[in-house]
Image (cartoon, helix red, strand yellow):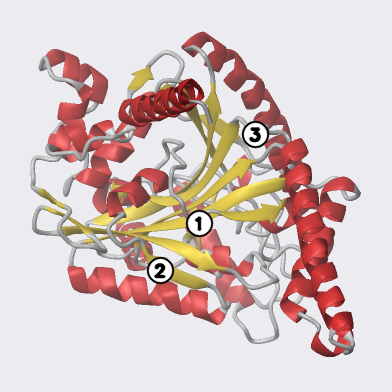
Amino acid sequence: MPKEKKQKVKTKKESILTKLFKKFKANKIAKPRTTPQIIRMFFRDFFENSSIIQLDENHYSVCFEYQDISFSKANYEEQESIFLKWVEYLHSFNYNDHIQVICSGKPVKTQDYKKNYIYDTNNLSENKSKIAKEFNELIETCLGNKDEILCEIRQVVITTKAESIKDAQDIFMQYQLRTEEKFKELKSKIRRVPIQERLAALYNVFHTTLLEDDGITNIIQYAKDNNLSIYDVIAPKEDVSLREKNYIKIGENKFIRALYVSRLPKSVTPRFYNRITTIENANIITTLNITPTDPAKVIQKVNKKISGMKTERLEKIKKANKNNYSYEAVKDEKLEDSIRDAQALRDALQKKKQKLFTNNVVICIQASTLDELNKVTKQIKDIGNEHMISIYNLDWQQLEGLQNCLAFGWNNLQMQRSLTSESTAANVPFNTKDLMHPNSIFHGINLVSKNPVFCDRKKLLNGNGCVLATSGAGKSFSIKIIIEQVLLRYPQDEVIVIDPQRRI
């Protein structure tokens, strides 16, 4: 090769390396050294009026909260209908988007929470006051005696790539209309989560006390009034320790651990997701990270892979014939399985109109002691083992795991698994509908979610009700309890008892 040509090739290589180095340097995230720098990892900017958060230079996210619906105890036809509608919703996104489906517990002070459900004993007669106190003891027992109660919230976070905030607003408006329409078909309601709630959730994760306990009602206004950046307000005052490989320590009494689902069995059911999201007495955030892929590129890649594996098989056949033995006798079963799987994937993408998604499942645990953290971790891993699912700690990536778990829309973990639409939708993010109407009647415990049932039938689409049970199970007693609560809660209502058999 001539000297001049060699020099040109060398210069070209140096130019490419220079560009790569500059790109790496521009995107490199420095190791955070202060707590405000840690908070900066979660968002770059926010837009209060549009409830949009900017993650980096050209990625924006918006959050929707949705109501749970009855899925676990629905019949097969209803479950299939919900599943197919969820698949349709996932298909509505393109490869520039990312979807987070989050189930978490929102901490609320128990005393404040109980005020919405217990009976006010003031201005009651002696007998009514005695009955009301008995009901209050029963309700308080069901709600527990901890300082905080975790109210389950379910959210969908949509991240998209856009040139500017205006473009992001237009894209998110379309997605909001589409999301409202689809969740209406699922008989669920959604609302757009304002910026303050998203920032408050991050504040509560990094602090040992709640935002309202610190006297902050408006976190954005508080930052302005005190001439602070929003990162300074959210940043914890306690020391954040990242020295341990599998948990984060905040202060002396808060521990956080991020886990990820590594291996899945060939068949997955919604049972695993529902069990993880209904673990009692544990502050757990479960996040499904779902990213669509470009269909054209995926099919091209699959065809190329199939062609390569068939070429490999042909070489093995030629080698077998050359040595005078049958390929069937020494067939490479692993290669044959890979060819069949790749062909099945191609058929699913081309003939069954499925899409391919990259997925990961991140689980974040918050606890007040290390023993409690380890106990909940073992409980989650045991549930995974029961369903033949491997769950591991995110060693030395705890901060990144937390970043990908919270409702901001990040998806930068390398642990990704490619699944078709149906496999992705197997973790249907619905379990059971909880009835938690304030100042209503206590009906017992929801056997699926383990939450109390407080129902005001006047607020339901159909206010009728019935009590069904075997003989001697206590139907009449249950009706009497309901009547007592009606007279206490709604003294202006009339109760008419019709008992043809005179059993009451």
The reply to whether dot 3 and dot 2 touch (C-beta < 8 Å) is: no
Residue 215's spot in the image, x, y percent?
15, 32
Q: Residue furthest top?
A: 166
Cα distance in 3D space between marks 3 and 1: 19 Å
The answer to whether residue 359 is left or right of residue 404 is: right
Of residues 502 and 177, the one nearer the viewer is 177
Q: The C terminus appears in which quarter of the rendering?
A: bottom right
Identify the mark at residue 361; answer none if there is no mark.
1
Q: Earlier in the sequence, mark 3 or mark 1?
A: 3
Q: Is residue 323 something that shows in the picture?
A: yes
Of residues 42 and 212, the one nearer the viewer is 42
Q: What is the secondary structure assignment of the residue under circle 3?
A: loop
Type of amino acid under label 1: Val
Type of amino acid under label 3: Tyr
Would you identify the image quadrant in which residue 392 lies?
A: bottom left
Residue 212's spot in the image, x, y percent?
21, 36
The reply to whether dot 3 and dot 1 touch (C-beta < 8 Å) is: no
Of residues 182 and 188, the one nearer the viewer is 182
Residue at horizontal 67 percent and vertical 78 percent from the top: 503
Residue 158's spot in the image, x, y percent?
54, 33
Residue at horizontal 50 percent and vertical 56 percent from the top: 361
Q: Is residue 218 something that shows in the picture?
A: no
Residue at horizontal 73 percent and vertical 44 percent from the top: 298
Type of amino acid under label 2: Tyr
Residue at horizontal 75 percent and vertical 77 percent from the top: 501
Q: Residues within 10 Å of mark 1 (few under 14, many from 20)?
A: many
